[in-house]
Image: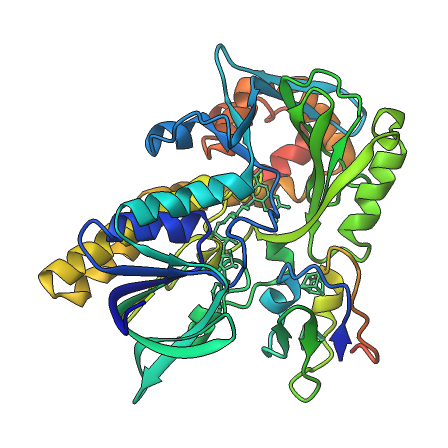
Amino acid sequence: MKIKNCYGCGGCVAVCPTGAITLESEVEIITEKCIKCGKCELVCPAGLITIENER
Amino acid sequence: MKDEYDVIVIGAGPAGSTAAKFAAEKADVLVVDKHREIGSPKRCGEGLGLKAFEKFEIPLDKRFVNKEMCGAVVYAPNGSKVEIEYDGIYGYIIERKIFDKFLATEASRQGAKVLADTEASLLKENGRIIGVRITHQRKEKEIKAKIIVAADGVDSQIARQAGIDTTINLADIGSCFEYEMSGIEIENPEMIHMFMGNKLAPKGYVWIFPKDDDRANIGIGISGTEKRTAKYYLDRFIKSRPGLEKGSIIEVNVGCVPVGDFLRELVRDNLMVVGDAARQVNPIHGGGICEAMLAGKLAGIKAGKAINSGNLEMLKEYETEWFSTEGKKLEKILKVRHFAEKLGDEDMNYLAKVWNGDDLVRISGGEYSIAFKKIIKHPRLLGLLKNFV
Ligand SMILES: Cc1cc2nc3c(=O)[nH]c(=O)nc-3n(C[C@H](O)[C@H](O)[C@H](O)COP(=O)(O)OP(=O)(O)OC[C@H]3O[C@@H](n4cnc5c(N)ncnc54)[C@H](O)[C@@H]3O)c2cc1C
Ligand code: SF4
Ligand code: SF4
């Protein structure tokens, strides 16, 4: 999953427990590592992330 | 660029550039930053206390000093104010983009080599850190180093690559959104303004830091656990104030700041972690520039000495000295944050009645005994205090 228009603040990367997110010019969530905990969605100051099937 | 340095610093923010400057007194230093322009994007309210200017002999250069702060006004949820007034100047609202470049320039003047547009990752051999792999303007290169300083900010990947778990709990991160606005009305632009309240900014605050009489950084930090976004709360705040609403947005900044548990392991083998990467931030107001520079200085000095003496064991002294000085102070301030997080709006209104500006200054510096004596008649607050000690 790729997040467009991301501000690159790194908040989601900092809270992700599995290291599933990489940050380049846009955020990329590597789905195999993602455990769908929803933390990145909560922390994003701009509300750019939506994790489906949150636990 | 050479193939080998004594020290490589990753990240040229306040922590990294300061570490580089002090390490460069004794060692051969390279500093890299992935951004094309050091200092940009700014992700900062740009408030810097006088203490930092004095401690680091920072000149009052017009190119990065926007406006003097003569004090602060803290607003309780019911609108009542507590004013923190100083006889002289309390600090300055700076221009981070120029300030960070100034710090990087200072490092280079001390002999460090600075390289922007350069992303780094750790280079290991048989599990040992032997240097970094960099991508500079799309070209990859391996550079060896005896010591690595991870000054790579809140989402530190370098410390993670070294095996230190830097994952931050949601409750320990401030989710921030900020506009730099012009053409606004600021009541008393000589002061900085901070608005508290659980409906306004849950477990955080809204700030107005004036850069001119009609221009300011207007931002918010809220708890990472909050369902609604920082942007939602900030937009709502601005909308409710016609003097701000009519203004223009000249910059948008989004950032996260570590405001909770500090990283404990600051040194592993030949790697040191400094600044936001080590969560060295004042947990009450989220200011981290001065703390980052203090940690950078300490780490830089130790790195230089370790190179000089050939004894890398010395690096551990950075960790022990940090936690017996500045780190210890931050620890006390964190306790105050944990107390403040439990306050309801009514509690805050009450505190605005019994506390004055001096109390707030002492508390944000971790000295709480005088202020806390003033609230022992309030049964609920007294209960919160019991958990505190
Ligand atoms: C919205 C907001 C408002 C704030 N307001 C204030 C304030 O008013 N006053 C105050 O004192 N503090 C404030 N802070 C906190 C302050 O900005 C930080 O504490 C400070 O910037 C920390 O400095 P640092 O050098 O540790 O990290 P940073 O300034 O974040 O620098 C880290 C650098 O590392 C680089 N980097 C990261 N990874 C790599 C890599 N792999 N390779 C190369 N380079 C890399 C980044 O590009 C970045 O330049 C605020 C923070 C936020 C989010
Ligand atoms: S949902 Fe959780 S595991 Fe998945 S990317 Fe977000 S923070 Fe990481
Ligand atoms: S938290 Fe949001 S804005 Fe920040 S890097 Fe992640 S997706 Fe981008």
The quadrant in which residue B197 appears is top right
Q: Is residue B113 above or below residue B377?
A: below
Left or right for A6, reference B361? right
Q: Is residue A24 above or below residue B349?
A: below
Applied colour scheme: rainbow
Across and down, in percent, residue B137 comes to 50, 70
Tell me if I can see residue B225 in this picture: yes
Left or right for B173, reference B188? left
Q: Is residue B37 above or below residue B344?
A: below
Q: Nearer the viewer, residue B253 or B71?
A: B253
Residue located at (39% from left, 27% from top): B59
Q: Nearer the viewer, residue B35 or B321?
A: B35
Number of numbered markers: 0
Across and down, in percent, residue B129 comes to 31, 78
Left or right for B18, reference A24? left
Across and down, in percent, residue A42 comes to 75, 62
Q: Nearer the viewer, residue A12 or B371?
A: A12
Q: Quadrant of the N terminus of chain B?
A: bottom left
Residue located at (68% from left, 19% from top): B189
Q: Nearer the viewer, residue B20 or B347?
A: B20
Across and down, in percent, residue B312 comes to 18, 66
Q: Is residue B238 above or below residue B37?
A: above
Tell me if I can see residue B323 in this picture: no
Left or right for B171, reference B134? right
Residue sitting at the far left: B309
Residue located at (65% from left, 44% from top): B341
